[in-house]
Amino acid sequence: MLSENQLQPDNSVIKPFGDLTQSEKNGKIVLAFLDNDLKVMGDFYPPEDDGLPITGDYIRNLLEQKNIVYGIRHDEIFRAFEKCIDTYEIVRDVLIASGDPPIDEEPEYLQLNPILSDPFQIWADEHGNNDSTVDYRSRTPFVIVKKGQALAKLKRAKSGEEGIDVHGGKIDFKFKKPSGIIGGENTRMEGRFLVSNINGQFLFSQGIVSVSDHLVIKGPVGYSTGNIVFPGDIHIDGPVSDGFKIYSGGSVTIKQTFDVTDTVTKYDLNVAGGIIGRGKAKLKVGGTLRTKFIENCRVACRKSVIVEKEIINSNVYTLERLEMGEKGRIVGGEVYAAKGLCTGNIGKRTGRAARIHCGVDFTVEREREKNNGILRVITIKIGRLKEKIMDPDTDDERRGKMEALLKKLEEQQRQSQTRVADLLGKGITYKDAVVEVRGEIVTGSLIEICQAALFVSEPLKKVRIRLDRESNLLITEKL
């Protein structure tokens, strides 16, 4: 058995080798008590020079002296002991003993669904942090939930249990009061789950879980927000940057400039600043559109379009009216306004000519144009195919395959021709459509109502243009 001095290893001081006493050269185990004596870790030291090694009696006496009686890890101790005496190396962080921690008593409480707590981490897990092909515009800080989605789960009450430390002493359990949550607006309990009543934005504030049917963005839309996809109304206080998409199942209000890339809103769109496109920008509005100006953009709107100042080099489509301010101006581009329009000026002497189409349903016109395009492609294919069939160098097997393909193309051609014929009369829907211009229509502008056209060869000022049903011609009247 080792001396009494060797049983005090955790009080020893590391000294230079030459200054060590005989007892300090002996092997030793340095213990560390952790977590209020729930765990004991040990470092096994081999002897120095002619010191004595660790023995089994030394270990038993050390455990007894330190009153370590519960949860002793005999296998770990033995493996560390063998390694230390065989290799003469220090063996660190050996689990000597571990007790049983107490289990706190918990009342019944609602626990938040973990998938809703960190949208950025969820996004990173789905897309990968190092993928160079990832579009970071799809990253969003907003958590959108679906109707019926689980927001929290009711955790059952849990009884407390006493713990035991390595000395065999009891550890009292505590009464744990979790930071539970309560359901707020647009939520309900369904069995053990708190679920959402609507599609909307998940909100969690001061222990209250709620779902909002509108999304408020205090600043700009950019990389800090990502693309905006929301089932309800959206309110944006800042500008919208180029390259970011907006899809809304409600109405959208933007307090500053709107740099459009691709936007669809089910109901109204209100833009306090102007709307700027980049040539390929697309904007679809299911309700009314109000804005200061529209520039280089393609806009389709089911209800009226109201523009205060200018429409520049844009294609604007509405199934109702285009209303512009007293000094409003349409420069370049094309306007389809089914029920007519009212503006200050059409065209600009130094700008591109504008083309105005009224009285027609633009959705029907676009469908007709689409089918006409298909017809043109099919007609070209049929012509080329007939030339190859008539070619004397074409063998019989290949000619048979081409004749079968020709029959299919001719059938597609007949179907497209029938579709175009059906659409011809359906496009004209508002023969009472009127174009009113409080200022001037410049030379080169084209005005069309129900496919009756007026090419402006001389400037027209303060006029109303409408369709004369008897003559099916456009007439102009002074305002």
Image: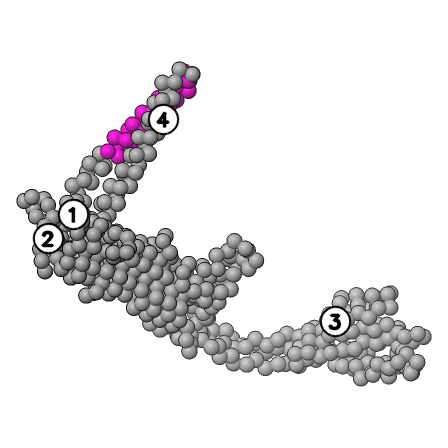
Task: For mark 4, give the secondary structure.
Answer: helix
- Which of pointers 4 and 1 lies earlier in the amino acid sequence? 4
Residue 139 seen from this side: yes
Which of the 4 quarters of the picture holds residue 237?
Answer: bottom left
Task: For mark 3, give the secondary structure.
Answer: strand
Q: Viewer-proximal residue, 224 or 381?
A: 381
Read off the magenta span. 394-417
Q: Which residue is mark 1?
A: 454
| Amino acid at dot 3 | Asp
Task: For mark 1, give the secondary structure.
Answer: strand
Front disc: 2 or 3: 2
| Amino acid at dot 2 | Thr
Q: Position of residue 261 (x, y in %)?
A: 38, 57
Residue lying at 45% horizontally and 70% vertically, measured from the top left: 112
Front disc: 4 or 2: 2
Above or below 110: residue 400 = above
- Which of pointers 2 and 3 lies earlier in the amino acid sequence? 3
Q: Which residue is mark 2?
A: 476
- The type of colouring in the image is one colour
- The reply to whether the C-beta atoms of the residues labelled 4 and 1 are less than 8 Å apart is no
- The reply to whether the C-beta atoms of the residues labelled 1 and 2 are less than 8 Å apart is yes
Q: Which residue is mark 4?
A: 384
- The reply to whether the C-beta atoms of the residues labelled 3 and 1 are less than 8 Å apart is no
- Which of pointers 3 and 1 lies earlier in the amino acid sequence? 3
Report how far apart the C-alphas of labels 3 and 1 lie in the structure: 93 Å
- Assess disc 1: are there few (<14), some (14-19) or many (≥20) residues with their C-alpha within 10 Å of its C-alpha: some
- Assess disc 4: are there few (<14), some (14-19) or many (≥20) residues with their C-alpha within 10 Å of its C-alpha: few
Report how far apart the C-alphas of labels 2 and 3 lie in the structure: 97 Å
Q: Which residue is mark 3?
A: 93
